[in-house]
Image (spheres, grey):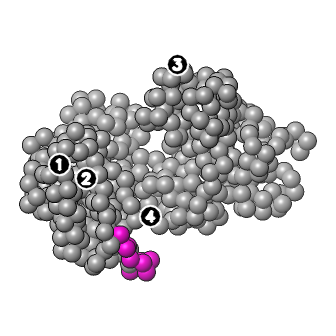
Amino acid sequence: MLPNQAQRVIAHVDLDAFYTQVEVQRNPDLKGKPVVTVQYNPFGDLRTITPDEPRIFNDSNGSLIAVSYEARASGVKRGMRGDQARKVCPEVQLVQVPTAHGKADLTVYRDAGKQVVEILSRMAICERASIDECYLDLTEEAHKRLAASGGQPPLPINPDRVHICGQDGDEAVADWWKRHPEQWQAGELLLACGATAVADLRAAVAAELDYSCSAGIAHNKILAKLASGMHKPSQQTLVPLAAVSGLLKDLPIPKLRQLGGKFGDELMASLSIKTVGELAEVTLQSLESLHGDSTAQWLYRLARGCDMEEVKQRTLPKSISCGKTFRNHTALHTIDEVRHWLKELGQELEERVLEDRKANARLPQLLTVSIYTSSSAGQGSGSAAPGQGQAQAPWQGSNNVSRSCQIRKATASCMGDDATALVSSFSLSNGH
């Protein structure tokens, strides 16, 4: 562990099955029932269904994108289809996500997430990572609480919902907290004070918004994210330095943040390893011979739970993006088809840009279109650049490409025309 790292307190907060929580709050009749949110059918009815319209479609066969803990207890799992969910849990309630512009409309969940972030930001630097998760830097708050405690951090509220990685049982947790000051190891006092702050913030979210969330508290982002998923729902886990090696020893490499994709697969194949513990046994010299000095040093530190990435204050999204995937018989083959859907995406962008302008007094400057061809369409939507809209099309002769231009006017018509021109210019430059 790097010397300065033990002086930081970082938390990862993850809202529990958030989409289903939002739906239950909007429809209290669902409370206590097994609830799932399902994706709309891209091959069926593409009409707009607003959040306030009836959206319980228990005959839906859509993919499940969020599963309440009541439904999980009956064997329902994320990724199932509606018929599979009904088979294991006949009483399951299937709530379809709202739709607009021929695609899913996540506004209701996005807005609910903003409310949570406002509460979590009260005591910490807050970096919103997605609709339902964020990172917190609680270092300053932890120092304040440590000074006020006289060197003996109090137990967090609801201590039965608090866990210490490497310590089993409620008594072990209480004993860990009540140790004599001389028994605390480097960084542990700060982590303990940070954990009390996280418990207070989670309680505030529950009291003010009626949402439950889980959290991980550690000295860096990587460990905090791992910890947040260890005990759910509505719980939190603290990772002291002494527990890091045990936590990582048998952890599959793809579970480690930043090693879940192609690079992680290549790393496992090149070294014939599967776990983070095995990666930690590889010498720095061996890593340098395979991946160069910079990447090798990063991997060497990562395998030991070291990560100095900062939590950056970001409660607002850096970009506004939307996209739609076209597969099989919905694939786009002509520029007119592309133009139609870019106009639809432009409608959503215009609505969200106007809303963001009213709330945050800002306007996007750059429009980017990311096009995925038929050979790579199965990969899903691409990443978004500031102020962009994105669409996918099966333009033959290329895998994927992005084109950008300045936004002349943030209207659906203007952005749709400019996006179509970008696609056309790419098509012409490739002889299609």
The residue type indicated by label 1 comes to Trp
Secondary structure state at the residue bearing disc 3 = loop
114 on left or right of 331? right
Q: Is 163 included in the stretch rendered in magenta? A: no
Q: Which residue is mark 1?
A: 395
Question: How far, Cα to Cα, is label 3 from label 4?
Answer: 39 Å
Of callouts 2 and 3, which one flags the residue occurring earlier in the amino acid sequence? 3
92 on left or right of 365? left
Q: Which residue is mark 2?
A: 371
Q: Residue sitting at 50 percent across and 36 percent down?
A: 259
Question: How far, Cα to Cα, is label 1 from label 4?
Answer: 30 Å
Of callouts 2 and 1, which one flags the residue occurring earlier in the amino acid sequence? 2
Residue 289 in the image: state x and y as whole percent: 60, 28
Name the residue nearer the viewer: 132 or 332: 332
Of callouts 1 and 4, which one flags the residue occurring earlier in the amino acid sequence? 4
Q: Residue sitting at 89 percent across and 45 percent down?
A: 181
Secondary structure state at the residue bearing disc 4 = loop
Q: Which residue is mark 4?
A: 317
Q: Which residues are magenta?
A: 358-366
Of callouts 4 and 2, which one flags the residue occurring earlier in the amino acid sequence? 4
Give residue 272's mark. 3
Secondary structure state at the residue bearing disc 2 = strand
Q: Residue sitting at 17 percent across and 61 percent down?
A: 424
Q: Is 364 included in the stretch rendered in magenta? A: yes
Question: How far, Cα to Cα, is label 1 from label 3?
Answer: 38 Å
The residue type indicated by label 4 comes to Pro
Of callouts 3 and 4, which one flags the residue occurring earlier in the amino acid sequence? 3
The residue type indicated by label 3 comes to Ser
Query: Mark 3 or 4, which is nearer the eye?
Result: 3
Query: Mark 4 or 2, which is nearer the eye?
Result: 2
